[in-house]
Amino acid sequence: MLVFLAKRLLQLIPTLFIVSVIIFGLQQLLPGDPALAMAGEERDPQVLEQIRRQYRLDQPFYIQYLYWVGGVLSGNLGESMRLKEPVLTLIAQKFPVTLQLALMAIVISLTIGITAGIMSAVKRDTPIDYAVNLVALWGISTPNFWLGIMLIFLFAVHLGWLPASGYVSPFQDFWLSMQTTILPAFVLGNSFAAVLMRHTRSAMLQAMSSDYVRTARAKGLAERVVVLKHAMRNALTPIVTLGALELGTLLSGAVLTEQVFSIPGFGKLIVDSVFNRDYAVVQGVTLITATTYILLNLLADIAYVLINPRLRS
Amino acid sequence: MAVAHAHVAELNHESPTARAWRRLLRRKSAVFGLAVITLLVLIAVLAPLIAPFDPTQQSWTAIRKPPSLQHWFGTDESGRDLFSRVIFGARASLLAGVVSISIALGLGVPIGLLAGYGGRWMDAVIGRITDAMLAIPFLILAIALAAFLGPSLQNAMIAIGLTATPIFVRLTRGQVMAVKVEDYVEAARAVGNPARRIAIKHILPNILPALIVQATISIATAIIAEASLSFLGLGQQPPAPSWGSMLNTAQRFLTNAPWMAVWPGLAIFLAVLSFNILGDGLRDALDPKER
């Protein structure tokens, strides 16, 4: 286990290095002089010169990169040009909002996805199975932002049950926080629920036709016990991996959801920064998201090994 | 009996393409997907002939009109006919889906072949770069690329294509690894074929089914990605119609003109659904285990 862990950690180094090069290299794609873009309306040569010096744009690419990576390694992701605040502070402010959304989305999608997946496998080739498959296909094919707009229309504009947009922290007012986040969390979790339904269904079908389930049935156990205790426990192992991986994907799905519901999270921060050409923030947020994703990948691998006794040795 | 024998003989002589077609057409959902895609392509190509109005023509006397006999889908905030805009919007979406995935295939397949067939070092370097690109969530990388390249449909397609490339690199590499130990590849090598010829003539045709399935499903992802970028203002620029940017505008008029949000969203959904079910059907039809 330790050797496996050490090996996986070592593999992270080149991956993270290349991620940092890609993210930093994006700035080089910018057509024209970055200093001009940073200066905005300002065209004074002295100001431009000062910007070039301040952001080391007059230095070669690799020197700029080394300074940036040096900063990142010492916990300095630079400063937002627009908000005049350290990027790390901004991320620390926005991350909990997106994390709350993502966790709620995971709870919603696990509940819907696993329940529907099991039902569909147990009731194979019945109308319930067909309905679940249709819902799953619908979930995979519906764009997040459209679903968000339609739900705002139904629940906020038409019925007036929930607020159309905005965000309240759960520490400030728990119930109001739930009201503001339930729709976006559902939208965010929708496609994951669909993916889970499909995976759970096929894993359950495989488990239900296995020898140990046949044995359990032969012992005369109740069907409920066979399904929930024997088949489900084994079928859910790969779902753990999927769940951890999907948390990373949810972080990026949050970009559109937060935009639709005007939620001041990670996703909205990156979109606002992109439009304001706030490169330090774009680079910082992308780097943190990629690192989170890589670490979740690692955690998923470890969890998989821990859960699956056959891989433990 | 004789008829049955003749039928079996006929099936045995069937080419792999014909067999895949036969199996695909047996699946109702896949046929539905294929029919809708064909219809969407026809609509996109024949848009100027089908659309009752010019999609960019503003009319100050027809602002935000609900669906009617004259304007089937209603009109938008500038009095433009939504039915015509949805029809022309199919062009941007389908183009983005096909062009971006062609870019991803054009880059990803050769790089994947190189990784799978070019030796250990090449494989290690390409593998790490692919891992790194896949670690950056798809939409965030596409947004960052589109933003740095500048907002336009062309740049959105490049951004989506580059972002989808590692998926095809990884798939091609995996397939090559599985195929290159097969006897026919060994035989091709034994008679002295150069590596490039083996990769293109012997390996590529055998990994084609997996690539076709992935490309079909990726077109669905690319259509959603283009709509997302356009929704954020990073794709097709106004006044040219695109389903994503139409939804962006519609959001502002949700209280007064909800129909503005319904049609472009339904169009994206239908296009994505069709490519997804066609992809599922192709996976089953091209699976050699299912004869």
Image (cartoon, rainbow, N blue to C red):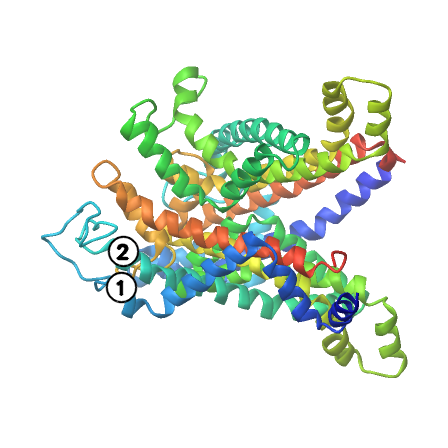
Residue A55 visible in the displayed image: no
Horizontal side of residue A31 vs A229, given as left or right: left
Residue A202 visible in the displayed image: yes
**What residue is shown at x 52% (from left), y 27% (from top)?**
A104
Give SS at disc 2: helix
Which residue is identified by label 2? Answer: B83
Q: Is residue A212 above or below residue A285?
A: above
Which residue is identified by label 1? Answer: B51
Q: Amino acid at mark 2?
A: Phe
**Tally of numbered discs:** 2
Q: Amino acid at mark 1?
A: Ala
Please state the horizontal and vertical placement of residue A5, each as a whole percent of the image: 80, 39
Please state the horizontal and vertical placement of residue A81, each as a whole percent of the image: 39, 46
**A66, A90: nearer the viewer:** A90
Please state the horizontal and vertical placement of residue A135, each as a whole percent of the image: 52, 38
Separation of disc 2 and disc 1 at Cα? 7 Å
**What residue is shown at x 51% (from left), y 40% (from top)?**
A139
Q: Are marks 2 and 1 in contact (CB under 8 Å)?
A: yes
